């Protein structure tokens, strides 16, 4: 009788843990040379296109003797920058006195009127620096731009881009307290008229500024309290009026961009003006580039009439082209789309390759808990894609911007936290897109079909949204509902509710905030993973 001795491995018994499963999936990935090459290509195209953009981009301007001119000489004067480093618009008529130390200013605003460009404002003969010119030609008409502003302001000086705090009435938006260009808090609603005046007050205590409003001058309500760090002992306090240029929809890009029609004016009437802590004379200055016919004030019998044009607000990126420069942080990341395609192919093959060769049976035999297998694959492909995205985006942004600075070209400023968020966000975008692709591949089990679905659901909606192929409302909803919403995480510049501009996708803005759009992409990935895990358990390998 033959005795058969069962085989016993020399290896000590151990658990088939998740760490071992992760290691096994990583070993699969790194041993396939084609996948590693594709990841390196993803890094290379992201970085290479950013560097190329910084190296070859040119800025063109008007034709001179039949030839286009290029370079720094073409650009308009660069915009001033605010305390946060963002480009700003800072032009207004300012009637002021020095305020040494603590104190307050109180006024009553009784009237706001103004002028807007007329129906013929864009005619060839509509030249002239101010909206008051050509009134008989239909080039101007009475009216107020909705964000025309008049009120009181405290600021260190008259330099453009200075820190400030102001409480004001915006023609179409009621009382507002605004400071340092980007911050905005509402107060009393409603328009101003002699029968419906607004009382405004600003108080200073060191670096702390508090704004108040009132309908009757007796019952006051606090609008906001803010801090302007580093205010000098002597600041300027007074009255101001300003009114932004009117914009209208342009027929270009399917009617989804705006153009400036011309300057507008705001005419504000103040009385009951009290400035405590100062005893000087009032002085009128126009902050910003002085233009004939724009900015003046009259004082008589305790009443001030202040006329101004311009704005005190952040300058949206949508207006970058008006300076002759549209080089922005997102321009360096045009290679993200090619990188995404490369990553999608790798993520697809990471799962469909096993089905095609029958290796999925071996994998599921070694690790029968199928949900863990899918989770391990998702972690590996997500981590690899994240690293590729961060490395490529960092090289594109940092090297591309350095080359552009060396060439003395202007880049629309972005803060360093924004740059970090965009770089890391690119990595997160590729990681979640790779996980979504892996889940789709698990469901479809076919490489070509998986890549096609990914391109149709992620890349195609983005390009439809930023081109005039579809109406603006269609593009905006695509960027709200489809996985393409995740590209919002790369948006470097915010939309400002207090500034009228074209905030459509064709101008580089997303309908959802940066992280909100990314959450939409994550939701699609989670949903796809749930479906993939269910089908992986239910179907035969």
Image (spheres, rainbow, N blue to C red):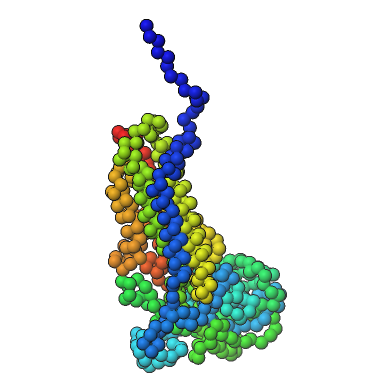
Q: Position of residue 399 (x, y in %)?
A: 51, 65
Q: Is residue 163 visible?
A: yes
Q: Is residue 535 visible?
A: no
Q: Is 462 placed left or right of 149 in the picture? A: left
Please tell me in which quadrant of the rendered image residue 239 appears: bottom right
Q: Left or right: 96 with respect to 412? A: right
Residue plotted at (29% across, 45% down): 446
Instruction: Residue 365: name its quadrant.
Output: top left
Residue 444 x, y percent position in the rendering: 29, 44
Residue 98 vs 165, above or below: the answer is: below
Q: Is residue 363 above or below residue 390?
A: above
Q: Residue at x 46, y 89 (%)?
A: 129
Say which of 59 and 462 sits in front.
59
Q: Classify 322 as above or below 43.
A: below
Q: Position of residue 291 (x, y in %)?
A: 51, 88
> Farthest residue in the top direction?
1
Is 529 or 206 nearer to us in this picture?
529
Task: Depth check: give the residue in front, 132 or 239.
Answer: 132
Residue drawn 33% across the image and 45% down it: 441
Image quarter (top left, top right, bottom left or bottom right) of the C terminus: top left
Q: Is residue 278 left or right of residue 36?
A: right
Of the 4 image quadrants, the one containing the N terminus is: top left
* Position of residue 371 measured from the top left corner of the image (x, y, whole percent): 40, 36
Considering only vertical position in the picture, is 166 above or below 94? above
Number of labels in the image equals 0
The residue lying at 62 percent from left, 76 percent from top is 155
């Amino acid at each position: 009788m033959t005795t058969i001795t069962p085989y016993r491995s020399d290896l000590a018994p151990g658990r088939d843990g998740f760490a071992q499963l992760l290691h096994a999936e990583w070993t699969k990935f790194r041993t396939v040379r084609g996948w590693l090459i594709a990841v390196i290509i993803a890094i290379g195209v992201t970085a290479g296109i950013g560097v190329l953009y910084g190296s070859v981009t040119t800025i063109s301007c008007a034709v001179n003797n039949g030839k286009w001119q290029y370079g720094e000489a073409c650009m308009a004067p660069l915009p001033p920058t605010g305390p946060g480093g963002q480009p700003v618009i800072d032009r207004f008529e300012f009637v002021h006195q020095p305020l040494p130390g603590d104190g307050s200013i109180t006024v009553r605003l009784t009237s706001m009127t103004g002028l807007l460009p007329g129906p013929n404002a864009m005619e060839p003969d509509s030249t002239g620096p101010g909206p008051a010119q050509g009134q008989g030609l239909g080039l101007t008409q009475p009216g107020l731009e909705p964000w025309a502003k008049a009120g009181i302001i405290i600021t260190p000086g008259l330099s453009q881009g200075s820190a400030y705090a102001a409480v004001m009435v915006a023609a179409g938006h009621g009382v507002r307290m605004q400071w340092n260009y980007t911050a905005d808090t509402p107060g009393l609603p409603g328009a101003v008229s002699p029968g419906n005046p607004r009382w405004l007050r600003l108080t200073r205590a060191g670096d702390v500024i508090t704004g108040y409003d009132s309908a009757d001058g007796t019952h006051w309500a606090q609008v906001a309290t803010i801090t302007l760090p580093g205010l000098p002992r002597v600041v300027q306090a007074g009255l101001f009026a300003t009114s932004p240029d009117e914009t209208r929809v342009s027929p270009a890009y399917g009617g989804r961009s705006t153009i400036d029609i011309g300057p507008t004016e705001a005419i504000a009437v103040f009385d009951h003006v009290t400035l405590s802590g100062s005893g000087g004379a009032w002085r009128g200055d126009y902050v910003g580039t002085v233009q004939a016919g724009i900015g003046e004030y009259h004082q008589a019998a305790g009443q001030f009439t202040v006329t101004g044009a311009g704005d005190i607000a952040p300058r949206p990126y949508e207006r970058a082209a008006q300076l002759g420069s549209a080089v922005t942080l997102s321009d360096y990341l045009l290679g993200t789309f090619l990188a995404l395609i490369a990553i999608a192919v790798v993520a697809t093959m990471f799962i469909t390759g096993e089905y095609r060769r029958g290796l999925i049976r071996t994998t599921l035999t070694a690790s029968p808990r199928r949900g863990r297998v899918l989770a391990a694959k998702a972690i590996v492909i997500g981590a690899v894609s994240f690293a590729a995205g961060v490395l490529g985006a960092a090289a594109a942004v940092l090297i591309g911007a350095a080359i552009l600075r060396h060439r003395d070209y202007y880049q629309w400023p972005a803060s360093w936290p924004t740059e970090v968020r965009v770089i890391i966000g690119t990595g997160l975008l590729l990681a979640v897109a790779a996980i979504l692709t892996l889940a789709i591949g698990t469901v479809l089990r076919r490489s070509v079909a998986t890549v096609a679905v990914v391109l149709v659901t992620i890349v195609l909606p983005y390009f439809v949204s930023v081109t005039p192929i579809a109406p603006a409302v269609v593009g905006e909803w695509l960027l709200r509902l489809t996985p393409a919403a995740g590209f919002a995480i790369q948006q470097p510049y915010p939309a400002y509710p207090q500034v009228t501009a074209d905030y459509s996708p064709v101008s580089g803005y997303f309908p959802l905030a940066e992280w909100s759009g990314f959450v939409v992409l994550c939701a699609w990935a989670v949903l796809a993973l749930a479906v993939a895990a269910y089908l992986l358990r239910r179907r035969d390998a």
